Amino acid sequence: MRRKERQVTDLEEIKALVETCQVVRIAFNGPEYPYIVPVNYGYKWEEEQLILYVHGATQGEKISRLQADEKVAIEIDDKHALIEGGNRADRYSYAYESIIGFGKAELLNDVEEKRYALHALMDHAAKGMSFDEIPERMIERTGIIKITLSDYTMKQHKPKTNM
């Protein structure tokens, strides 16, 4: 990481960003170009290990690329704001928080693991809401990708406050 002063190592801050955001961008490898797709996600933490869940069809571009290469990159970002510099262009900047990560993706087949993932997705997307049990036939028809990150880093750039 080039800008070490922007790196966030506090796990609670990292977890807060994962909780706040609703969209992860996943980059899949491909024969000629990478394929990046923004999707909603659910997640779980196993100590410092971050696991993401995304859902969709059981076939298509994401699934084809995953089957060809399980390695993926992810990106999550939030708290975007222009940092103004008056009439000096060199003083303008942009505030943000972001996580970049790398890991392996797998298509889940086990109904109970898929059920868990769908509940994680709903818990994240519809915080505090209750909903009916997801029918098993719907779970069986839904494609669930589990992404286990082997490495991730968070950066943030905040506006300077004048005191």
Image (cartoon, helix red, strand yellow):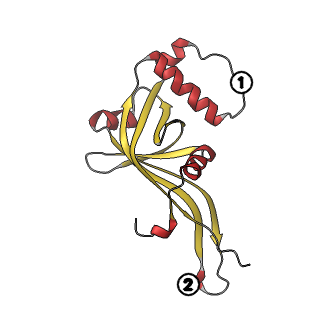
Categorize mark 1 by other alpha carbons within 10 Å: few (<14), some (14-19), many (20+): few
Which residue, as the protein is rendered here, is positioned at the far bottom?
88
Task: Tell me the crowding category of disc 2: few under 14, some 14 to 19, or many 20 or more residues within 10 angstroms, Cα based.
Answer: few
Local secondary structure at mark 1: loop
Task: Quadrant for residue 62, please give it.
Answer: top left
Residue at 69% from the left image edge and 22% from the top image edge: 131
Quarter of the image for the C terminus: give it: bottom right
For marks 1 and 2, give the CA distance.
49 Å
Q: Position of residue 101 (x, y in %)?
A: 42, 49
Q: Residue at x 49, y 30 (%)?
A: 56
Vertical position of residue 53 compared to residue 18: above or below: above
Q: How many marks?
A: 2
Q: Earlier in the sequence, mark 1 or mark 2?
A: 2
Rendered image: mark on residue 49: none
Find residue 122 and report its image quarter. Answer: top right
Q: Quadrant of the N terminus?
A: bottom left
Looking at the rendered structure, the kind of residue marked 1 is Ser
Q: Nearer the viewer, residue 1 or 55?
A: 1
Relative side of 21 to 24, left or right: right
Q: Which residue matches tag 2?
A: 90
Provide residue 87's location: percent of width, then percent of height.
65, 87
For discs 1 and 2, the disc positioned in front in the rendered view: 1
Q: Position of residue 59 (x, y in %)?
A: 39, 28
| Amino acid at pointer 2 | Asp
- Residue with the mark numbered 1: 130
